[in-house]
């Protein structure tokens, strides 16, 4: 158990470090690269929580898809790689309040043991369970999200087509 | 194979009996396994490089390397490897040094990580994950990240162009690739590599081997096409097109760092062939006989190992054959092919597979395959014929 805890602290520190580079990095491409490491750290944390399926999907979608598209967009924007990005904008105080509030809320939740934060049930294999749950118990939210994504896709295509 | 797993178990038991904490034997096993895998990758990549040079040479009616080492220049790759090791390591002055150094490590690391779930022989697999196939696909998608890092950090226009093309290509071809793998996963009802192979042990109609390539021939062809694109092999090699981009994303790399990219490329070819072999070609299944003087499991395992390698290297041979036969696709053709042809067909394959699995018996899978083939034919016929421009013809 202690080894697992040690690995958790290492991964957590790694993920937070990568996230800090994303937020504080002046070079936008480096920030995007750090985002990849951040997502990989998150995936490793999912593995630690026995959610291998979620971890694999995290790497496949977020690292293999979304971050690559991000990098693609950055590279298509001319000279964005050499200019330095502004790290802090005018809403720094507002966002600091929000961040501290979230932190306090999370600490309160984890110390007072809110039911949603208790350990997940142990499953031998998560993928079949997830699939069945998505298509039976949670079919309606699943379909709603699908329609939402479809609408977003159609919207993106309409925005991208200049006519 | 009983022997491999039981050997590890016996080692653990012996260590526990001596009162050594479990972390020590675990680390020892890990180091040994990683060393074996790395050694295999290096030797296989060197062989594949020599083999590719020989195949290309024979396709072009010449001999290829003939001198180093004597017999047909077999030591050429070793000599090249030593040369690359001894070369000066150059990092361009304008490069982003951290990302530049990190890029080959990401590419190589992602490729090696995929070897974890390759089922070499019955029971001989580093870790048979529940999500095996998904793990392999997702970890291989990290290779593109390394390519983009390399291309951007080199601070070179050709390299950046190569990285851009690679990003577009990878994102497009990953979608039909994953969808094509879903068909066999649905039939077998599992994503574990070991169980996928076991699910192919039967026979179709009592004659054909129970490989998923027969009911899922469409998925296999889609997978193989996308795998070529994922490996940046011709006809999908626009990220490193020599004639237009010099060498694409790895223009600025030299010495050992270039060797890492080179090694990873060939290691990746083996990974995609191993996935195809496992999912479509029955993995380690093949005829075998009990060898005299060996337990049945060991003989079965040895034959499985050989069959797996034979199937993998056959697919690799096809990839090399295609490389020296086909011409490179244009960027727009590449994109149109992925989104307008491969994606609809793979969706159709998925739907038909699902329908047959829910409604009919296994025999109906063949009907589904024929329906999809017809669909493909209709799609191809309905597309406007590409205007071909011959050499010397005025446009």
Image: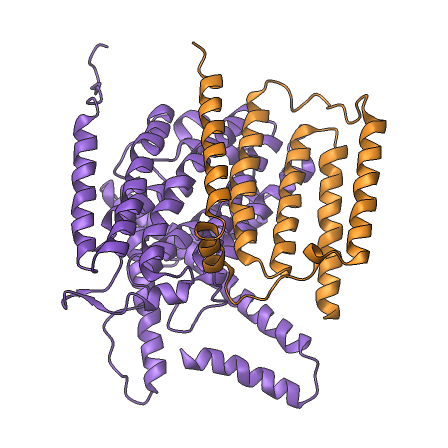
Chain colours: A orange, B purple
> In terms of depth relative to the viewer, which is nearer, B104 or B210?
B210
Residue B158 x %, y %: 51, 26
The answer to whether residue B248 shows anywhere in this view is no
Does residue A54 appear left or right of residue B357 in this picture? Answer: right
- Residue B293 position (above or below residue B168): below
Identify which residue is drawn at 40% across, 31% down: B238
Q: Quadrant of the C terminus of chain B?
A: top left
- Residue B208 position (above or below residue A39): below
Does residue B2 appear left or right of residue B34 in this picture? Answer: left
Residue B91 x %, y %: 64, 36
Residue A60 x %, y %: 51, 45
Identify which residue is drawn at 59% across, 31% down: B152
Q: Quadrant of the N terminus of chain B?
A: bottom left
The answer to whether residue A72 shows anywhere in this view is yes
> In terms of depth relative to the viewer, which is nearer, B66 or A78?
A78
Identify which residue is drawn at 32% across, 71% down: B304
Residue B28 x %, y %: 62, 74
> Would you identify the image quadrant in which residue A67 lies?
top right
């Amino acid at each position: 158990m202690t080894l697992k805890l040690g690995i958790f602290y290492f991964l957590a520190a790694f993920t937070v470090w990568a996230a800090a580079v994303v937020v504080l990095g002046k070079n936008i491409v480096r920030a995007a690269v750090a985002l990849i490491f951040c997502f990989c750290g998150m995936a490793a944390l999912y593995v630690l929580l026995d959610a291998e399926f979620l971890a694999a999907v995290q790497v496949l979608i977020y690292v293999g898809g979304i971050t690559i598209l991000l990098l693609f967009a950055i590279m298509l924007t001319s000279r964005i790689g050499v200019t330095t990005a502004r790290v802090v904008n005018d809403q720094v105080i507002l966002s600091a309040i929000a961040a501290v509030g979230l932190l306090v809320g999370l600490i309160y939740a984890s110390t007072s043991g809110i039911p949603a934060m208790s350990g997940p049930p142990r499953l031998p294999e998560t993928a079949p369970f997830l699939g069945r749950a998505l298509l039976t118990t949670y079919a309606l939210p699943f379909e709603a999200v699908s329609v939402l994504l479809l609408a977003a896709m159609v919207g993106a295509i309409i925005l991208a087509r200049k006519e | 194979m009983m022997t491999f797993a039981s050997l590890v178990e016996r080692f653990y038991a012996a260590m526990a009996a001596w009162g050594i904490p479990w972390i020590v034997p675990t680390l020892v096993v890990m180091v040994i396994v990683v060393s074996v895998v790395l050694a295999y990758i290096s030797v296989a990549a060197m062989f594949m490089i020599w083999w590719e040079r020989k195949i290309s040479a024979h396709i072009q009616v010449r001999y290829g390397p003939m001198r180093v080492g004597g017999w047909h220049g077999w030591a050429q790759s070793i000599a090249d490897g030593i040369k690359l090791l001894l070369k000066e390591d150059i990092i361009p002055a304008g490069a982003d040094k951290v990302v530049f150094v990190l890029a080959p490590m990401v590419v190589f690391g992602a490729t090696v990580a995929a070897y974890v779930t390759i089922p070499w022989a019955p029971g001989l697999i580093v870790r048979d994950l529940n999500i095996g196939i998904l793990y392999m696909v997702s970890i291989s998608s990290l290779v593109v990240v390394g390519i983009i890092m390399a291309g951007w950090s080199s601070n070179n226009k050709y390299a950046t162009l190569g990285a851009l093309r690679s990003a577009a290509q990878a994102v497009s071809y990953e979608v039909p690739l994953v969808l094509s793998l879903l068909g066999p996963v649905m039939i077998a009802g599992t994503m574990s590599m070991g169980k996928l192979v076991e699910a192919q042990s039967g026979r179709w109609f009592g004659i054909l081997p129970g490989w998923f390539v027969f009911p899922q021939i469409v998925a296999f062809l889609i997978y193989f096409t996308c795998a070529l694109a994922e490996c940046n092999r011709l006809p999908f090699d626009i990220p490193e097109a020599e004639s237009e981009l010099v060498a694409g994303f790895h223009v600025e790399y030299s010495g050992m760092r270039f060797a890492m990219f080179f090694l990873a490329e060939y290691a990746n070819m083996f990974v995609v062939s191993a996935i195809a072999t496992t999912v479509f070609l029955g993995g380690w299944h093949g005829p075998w006989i009990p060898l005299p003087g060996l337990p049945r499991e060991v003989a079965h395992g040895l034959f499985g190992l050989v069959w797996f390698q034979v199937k993998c290297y056959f697919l690799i041979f096809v990839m090399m054959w295609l490389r020296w036969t086909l011409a490179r696709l244009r960027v727009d053709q590449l994109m149109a092919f992925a989104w307008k042809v491969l994606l609809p067909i793979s969706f159709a394959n998925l739907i038909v597979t699902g329908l047959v699995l829910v409604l009919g018996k296994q025999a109906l899978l063949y009907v589904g395959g024929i329906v999809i083939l017809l669909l493909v034919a209709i799609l191809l016929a309905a597309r406007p014929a590409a205007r071909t421009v011959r050499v010397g013809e005025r446009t």
